[in-house]
Image: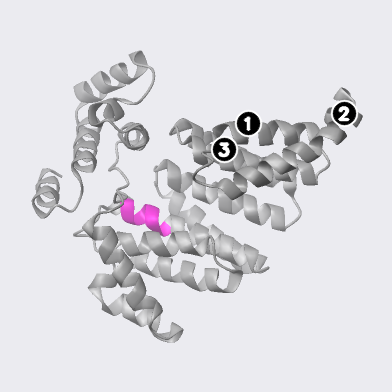
């Protein structure tokens, strides 16, 4: 582990905060005194996590704190504006200019297409594309995840990328109206997750995929339960925006079930958490939905929500 950390530092494969998080994770995993000291500091100090205070980034500190508790490497996500992000954009352009049938072979063959940055772009794009394109893009993301080089990225990170890509593929197939194939991708994500991926965002992505499939299969109660689990994970890592977006999803499902009080509560909670500047369309839609519920709430006796 020490050799790996030194090699990562010398090659500048990870930024300083990620390197420090991995080092502290390693210490907490192998040294009982370090683990006990860090746990005591976290318990006695409310607010941002220990690593967040050390490196001045609340969100990154929260992710690092989760890694420390799991005794695992931090799931490295390159910050925007880096050389890696620029290389990923060039790799994506190269990939999309190829005929669709040649893209998988290019990923298997070309080392520059086997990067975390390209995986991120593909996985994120798949969530916002039309269903047919989304499925192809998520499949490419999964292929990139499976090809991430062991010498460049830690094993737990490569596993997490595989899980998230499979979850994205399940969501794409759900939107395409292919529940059987969605279940296949979701089972793959769940199996990899069970093998020991502790990264909280990865767990949340699986819960969101489970929720989408449950909703498509006409089981809103199960979908709401999975959304509640995902929102709880986002709350734990102090990602207010993602928690807010998930609560808004819950609200729309409650509204579809004819439960205006539960819907209004979830929508209001989501709007309070959501960063409007990051998703103004979602904020406007949630506010409109909440406003439309007011007449129904006035006509609904308090006890009816529990009926």
145 in the magenta segment: no
The one nearer the camera, 111 or 72, is: 111
Q: Quick check: marks 3 and 1 in contact, CB under 8 Å?
A: yes
Mark 3 crowdedness (10 Å alpha carbons): few <14, some 14-19, many ≥20: many
The one nearer the camera, 160 or 276, is: 276
Residue 40 locus on image (x, y percent):
30, 16
Q: Quadrant of the N terminus?
A: top left
Please say whether residue 249 is visible from this viewpoint. no
Residue 197 locus on image (x, y percent):
39, 47
User: Which labelled disc corresponds to residue 269?
Assistant: 1
User: Which labelled disc corresponds to residue 244?
Assistant: 3
Q: Is residue 293 left or right of residue 90?
A: right
Q: Main secondary structure of the magenta part?
A: helix
How far apart marks 3 and 1 lie (CA) works out to 7 Å
| Mark closer to the chain start, 3 or 1 | 3
User: Which labelled disc corresponds to residue 298?
Assistant: 2
Start-end of magenta stretch: 157-162
Q: Quick check: marks 2 and 3 in contact, CB under 8 Å?
A: no
Residue 98 locus on image (x, y percent):
38, 84
How far apart marks 2 and 3 lie (CA) works out to 25 Å
Task: Between label 2 and label 3, give the one nearer the viewer.
Answer: 2
In the image, residue 106 above or below residue 250 = below
Figure label count: 3
């Amino acid at each position: 582990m020490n050799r790996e950390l030194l090699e990562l530092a010398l090659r500048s494969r990870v930024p300083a905060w990620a390197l420090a998080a991995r080092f502290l994770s390693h210490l907490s995993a192998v040294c009982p005194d370090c683990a006990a000291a860090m746990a005591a500091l976290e318990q006695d100090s409310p607010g941002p996590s220990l690593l967040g205070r050390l490196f001045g980034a609340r969100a990154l500190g929260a992710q690092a704190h989760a890694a420390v508790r799991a005794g695992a490497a931090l799931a490295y996500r390159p910050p925007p504006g880096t050389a890696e992000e620029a290389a990923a954009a060039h790799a994506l352009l190269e990939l999309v200019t190829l005929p669709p049938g040649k893209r998988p072979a290019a990923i298997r063959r070309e080392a520059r297409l086997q990067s975390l940055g390209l995986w991120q772009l593909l996985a994120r794009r798949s969530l916002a594309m039309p269903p047919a394109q989304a499925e192809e893009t998520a499949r490419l993301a999964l292929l990139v995840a499976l090809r991430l080089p062991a010498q460049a990225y830690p094993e737990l990170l490569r596993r997490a990328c595989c899980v998230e890509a499979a979850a994205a593929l399940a969501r794409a197939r759900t939107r395409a109206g292919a529940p059987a194939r969605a279940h296949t991708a979701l089972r793959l994500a769940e199996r990899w997750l069970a093998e020991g991926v502790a990264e909280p965002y990865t767990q949340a992505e699986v819960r969101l995929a489970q929720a989408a499939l449950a909703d498509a299969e006409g089981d809103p109660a199960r979908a709401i339960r999975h959304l509640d689990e995902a929102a709880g994970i986002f709350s734990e890592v102090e990602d207010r925006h993602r928690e807010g977006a998930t609560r808004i999803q819950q609200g729309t499902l409650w509204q579809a079930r004819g439960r205006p009080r539960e819907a209004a509560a979830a929508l209001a909670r989501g709007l309070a958490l959501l960063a409007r500047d990051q998703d103004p369309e979602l904020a406007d839609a949630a506010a409109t939905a909440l406003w439309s519920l007011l007449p129904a709430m006035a006509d609904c006796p308090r006890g009816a929500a529990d009926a």
